[in-house]
Image: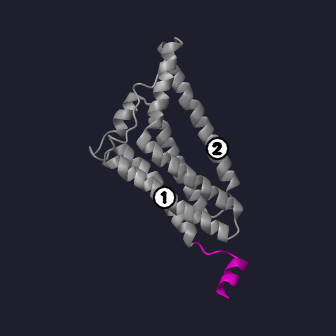
Amino acid sequence: MIAGWKASLAGADLADWVTVAAYLGTAALSAGAARQAFLRRRPRERLFWLLVTGLLCFLGVNELLDLQTLLTDIGRANARAYGWYGNHRQVQYYFVLILSLIAVAAGMLMLRLTRRTPGSIRLALAGLVFIGLFVLLRAASFHHLDDLLGSGFKSFPLGSFQEVFGIALVALAAALYRRRRSPGPYRRAARR
Protein backbone atom coordinates (compact mmCIF):
# COMPACT_ATOMS: atom_id res chain seq x y z
CA MET A 1 0.00 0.00 0.00
CA ILE A 2 2.84 2.44 0.75
CA ALA A 3 5.35 1.15 -1.79
CA GLY A 4 5.40 4.49 -3.66
CA TRP A 5 6.15 6.59 -0.59
CA LYS A 6 9.63 7.32 0.57
CA ALA A 7 10.83 9.84 3.09
CA SER A 8 12.36 12.79 1.30
CA LEU A 9 15.30 13.04 3.70
CA ALA A 10 17.78 11.60 1.18
CA GLY A 11 16.44 13.81 -1.61
CA ALA A 12 16.05 16.97 0.47
CA ASP A 13 17.04 20.12 -1.40
CA LEU A 14 17.98 23.62 -0.24
CA ALA A 15 14.34 24.67 0.15
CA ASP A 16 13.57 21.65 2.35
CA TRP A 17 16.51 22.30 4.67
CA VAL A 18 15.80 26.03 4.92
CA THR A 19 12.17 25.28 5.73
CA VAL A 20 13.12 22.70 8.37
CA ALA A 21 15.58 25.17 9.93
CA ALA A 22 12.85 27.84 9.92
CA TYR A 23 10.37 25.48 11.61
CA LEU A 24 12.83 24.37 14.28
CA GLY A 25 14.20 27.87 14.91
CA THR A 26 10.67 29.19 15.28
CA ALA A 27 9.84 26.27 17.58
CA ALA A 28 12.77 27.38 19.78
CA LEU A 29 11.42 30.96 19.81
CA SER A 30 7.97 29.61 20.70
CA ALA A 31 9.46 27.58 23.55
CA GLY A 32 11.07 30.79 24.80
CA ALA A 33 7.69 32.52 24.60
CA ALA A 34 6.19 29.64 26.62
CA ARG A 35 8.88 30.19 29.24
CA GLN A 36 8.04 33.91 29.37
CA ALA A 37 4.37 33.09 29.79
CA PHE A 38 5.29 30.76 32.67
CA LEU A 39 7.34 33.49 34.33
CA ARG A 40 4.45 35.94 33.88
CA ARG A 41 2.04 33.42 35.38
CA ARG A 42 -0.08 33.20 32.22
CA PRO A 43 -1.00 29.49 32.01
CA ARG A 44 -3.29 29.80 28.98
CA GLU A 45 -0.67 31.72 27.02
CA ARG A 46 1.96 29.20 28.08
CA LEU A 47 -0.23 26.36 26.84
CA PHE A 48 -0.70 28.17 23.54
CA TRP A 49 3.04 28.60 23.00
CA LEU A 50 3.74 25.00 24.03
CA LEU A 51 1.19 23.77 21.48
CA VAL A 52 2.75 26.01 18.83
CA THR A 53 6.19 24.60 19.70
CA GLY A 54 4.97 21.02 19.31
CA LEU A 55 3.15 21.77 16.07
CA LEU A 56 6.18 23.49 14.54
CA CYS A 57 8.45 20.58 15.51
CA PHE A 58 5.99 18.14 13.89
CA LEU A 59 5.80 20.24 10.72
CA GLY A 60 9.60 20.45 10.56
CA VAL A 61 9.90 16.67 10.77
CA ASN A 62 7.06 16.31 8.27
CA GLU A 63 8.97 18.50 5.81
CA LEU A 64 11.59 15.75 5.56
CA LEU A 65 9.35 12.70 5.98
CA ASP A 66 6.69 13.90 3.50
CA LEU A 67 3.84 12.37 5.51
CA GLN A 68 1.15 14.03 3.37
CA THR A 69 2.40 12.02 0.37
CA LEU A 70 2.14 8.88 2.48
CA LEU A 71 -1.43 9.82 3.40
CA THR A 72 -2.24 10.46 -0.28
CA ASP A 73 -0.74 7.10 -1.28
CA ILE A 74 -2.74 5.28 1.40
CA GLY A 75 -5.94 7.00 0.23
CA ARG A 76 -5.20 6.15 -3.40
CA ALA A 77 -4.48 2.51 -2.54
CA ASN A 78 -7.73 2.25 -0.56
CA ALA A 79 -9.67 3.87 -3.39
CA ARG A 80 -8.37 1.26 -5.81
CA ALA A 81 -8.84 -1.62 -3.38
CA TYR A 82 -12.45 -0.72 -2.61
CA GLY A 83 -13.43 0.27 -6.13
CA TRP A 84 -14.12 3.98 -5.77
CA TYR A 85 -10.99 5.30 -7.48
CA GLY A 86 -13.11 6.50 -10.41
CA ASN A 87 -14.75 8.98 -8.01
CA HIS A 88 -11.53 10.03 -6.31
CA ARG A 89 -11.75 13.65 -7.53
CA GLN A 90 -15.14 14.05 -5.88
CA VAL A 91 -13.87 12.46 -2.66
CA GLN A 92 -10.79 14.71 -2.84
CA TYR A 93 -13.03 17.75 -3.27
CA TYR A 94 -15.15 16.88 -0.24
CA PHE A 95 -12.04 16.05 1.80
CA VAL A 96 -10.57 19.49 1.13
CA LEU A 97 -13.94 21.18 1.69
CA ILE A 98 -14.45 19.48 5.06
CA LEU A 99 -10.90 20.21 6.17
CA SER A 100 -11.30 23.84 5.08
CA LEU A 101 -14.52 24.20 7.07
CA ILE A 102 -12.86 22.65 10.11
CA ALA A 103 -9.88 25.00 9.70
CA VAL A 104 -12.15 28.06 9.43
CA ALA A 105 -14.20 26.99 12.45
CA ALA A 106 -11.05 26.28 14.46
CA GLY A 107 -9.59 29.64 13.44
CA MET A 108 -12.74 31.49 14.47
CA LEU A 109 -12.81 29.63 17.79
CA MET A 110 -9.15 30.42 18.41
CA LEU A 111 -9.71 34.10 17.64
CA ARG A 112 -12.61 34.15 20.07
CA LEU A 113 -10.61 32.39 22.77
CA THR A 114 -7.67 34.75 22.27
CA ARG A 115 -9.59 38.03 22.09
CA ARG A 116 -8.11 39.18 25.40
CA THR A 117 -4.60 37.97 24.73
CA PRO A 118 -1.66 40.01 23.45
CA GLY A 119 -1.56 40.91 19.77
CA SER A 120 1.52 38.72 19.34
CA ILE A 121 -0.59 35.62 20.00
CA ARG A 122 -3.09 36.70 17.37
CA LEU A 123 -0.21 37.30 14.94
CA ALA A 124 1.05 33.80 15.67
CA LEU A 125 -2.43 32.46 14.94
CA ALA A 126 -2.46 34.30 11.60
CA GLY A 127 0.89 32.70 10.74
CA LEU A 128 -0.40 29.26 11.74
CA VAL A 129 -3.52 29.73 9.61
CA PHE A 130 -1.31 30.72 6.68
CA ILE A 131 0.85 27.62 7.18
CA GLY A 132 -2.25 25.45 7.63
CA LEU A 133 -3.82 26.66 4.40
CA PHE A 134 -0.56 26.06 2.55
CA VAL A 135 -0.21 22.54 3.97
CA LEU A 136 -3.87 21.82 3.19
CA LEU A 137 -3.48 22.92 -0.41
CA ARG A 138 -0.28 20.93 -0.80
CA ALA A 139 -1.91 17.84 0.71
CA ALA A 140 -4.88 18.15 -1.66
CA SER A 141 -2.45 17.39 -4.48
CA PHE A 142 -4.36 19.04 -7.29
CA HIS A 143 -1.97 18.85 -10.23
CA HIS A 144 -2.46 22.42 -11.48
CA LEU A 145 -1.87 23.69 -7.94
CA ASP A 146 1.24 21.53 -7.63
CA ASP A 147 2.55 23.15 -10.82
CA LEU A 148 1.95 26.64 -9.39
CA LEU A 149 3.55 25.89 -6.02
CA GLY A 150 6.52 24.29 -7.77
CA SER A 151 7.14 27.31 -10.01
CA GLY A 152 9.75 29.97 -9.34
CA PHE A 153 13.38 29.31 -8.60
CA LYS A 154 14.49 25.73 -9.07
CA SER A 155 16.21 25.51 -5.69
CA PHE A 156 13.54 27.50 -3.82
CA PRO A 157 10.08 27.30 -5.47
CA LEU A 158 7.12 29.61 -4.85
CA GLY A 159 5.49 27.18 -2.44
CA SER A 160 8.55 27.26 -0.20
CA PHE A 161 8.44 31.07 -0.05
CA GLN A 162 4.79 30.91 1.01
CA GLU A 163 5.47 28.34 3.71
CA VAL A 164 8.47 30.26 5.07
CA PHE A 165 6.38 33.47 5.12
CA GLY A 166 3.87 31.81 7.45
CA ILE A 167 6.70 30.50 9.64
CA ALA A 168 8.22 34.00 9.74
CA LEU A 169 4.92 35.43 11.03
CA VAL A 170 4.96 32.95 13.91
CA ALA A 171 8.65 33.68 14.61
CA LEU A 172 7.96 37.42 14.69
CA ALA A 173 5.01 36.85 17.02
CA ALA A 174 7.10 34.73 19.41
CA ALA A 175 9.89 37.33 19.42
CA LEU A 176 7.40 40.13 20.08
CA TYR A 177 5.78 38.16 22.89
CA ARG A 178 9.14 37.56 24.55
CA ARG A 179 10.01 41.27 24.41
CA ARG A 180 6.63 42.45 25.67
CA ARG A 181 6.69 44.03 29.10
CA SER A 182 4.52 42.44 31.72
CA PRO A 183 1.69 44.54 33.06
CA GLY A 184 0.90 45.09 36.68
CA PRO A 185 2.52 43.67 39.80
CA TYR A 186 4.99 41.40 38.02
CA ARG A 187 6.77 44.36 36.43
CA ARG A 188 6.81 46.28 39.71
CA ALA A 189 8.21 43.25 41.55
CA ALA A 190 10.88 42.81 38.90
CA ARG A 191 12.14 46.40 39.42
CA ARG A 192 12.86 45.84 43.11
The residue at the point 61 percent across, 69 percent down is 36
Amino acid at the residue labelled 1: Thr
Quarter of the image with the C terminus is: bottom right
Which quarter of the picture shows residue 116? bottom right
Mark 1 or mark 2: which comes first in sequence?
1
Residue projecting furthest to the left = 154
Secondary-structure class at tag 1: helix
Which range is magenta?
180-192
Asked if the magenta segment contains residue 46, the reply would be no
Foreground tag (1 vs 2): 1
Taking depth in this image into account, of 152 and 4 the one nearest to the observer is 4
The residue pinned by badge 1 equals 26
Label 1: how many Cα within 10 Å (few below 14, some 14–19, many 20+): many
Please state which amino acid type lies under the numbered disc 2. Ala
Query: Is residue 91 placed above or below 118 in the rendered structure?
Result: above
Foreground residue, 117 or 16? 16
Task: Residue 190: say if magenta.
Answer: yes
Could you say where residue 28 lies in the image, as x and y percent from the top left? 51, 61
Q: Residue at x 48, y 14 (%)?
A: 80
Seen at 31% across and 45% down, the residue is: 13
The location of residue 125, given as percent across then percent down, is 57, 53
Cα–Cα span, label 1 and label 2: 22 Å
Specify the farthest residue to the top: 83
Residue 138: give x, y in percent of width and height: 44, 36
Residue at the extreme bottom: 192
| Left or right position of 29 against 45 | left
Label 2: which secondary element = helix
Which residue in the protein does label 2 denote?
A: 106
Left or right placement of residue 54 versus residue 3 in this view: right
From the viewer's side, name the closer residue of 189 and 128.
189
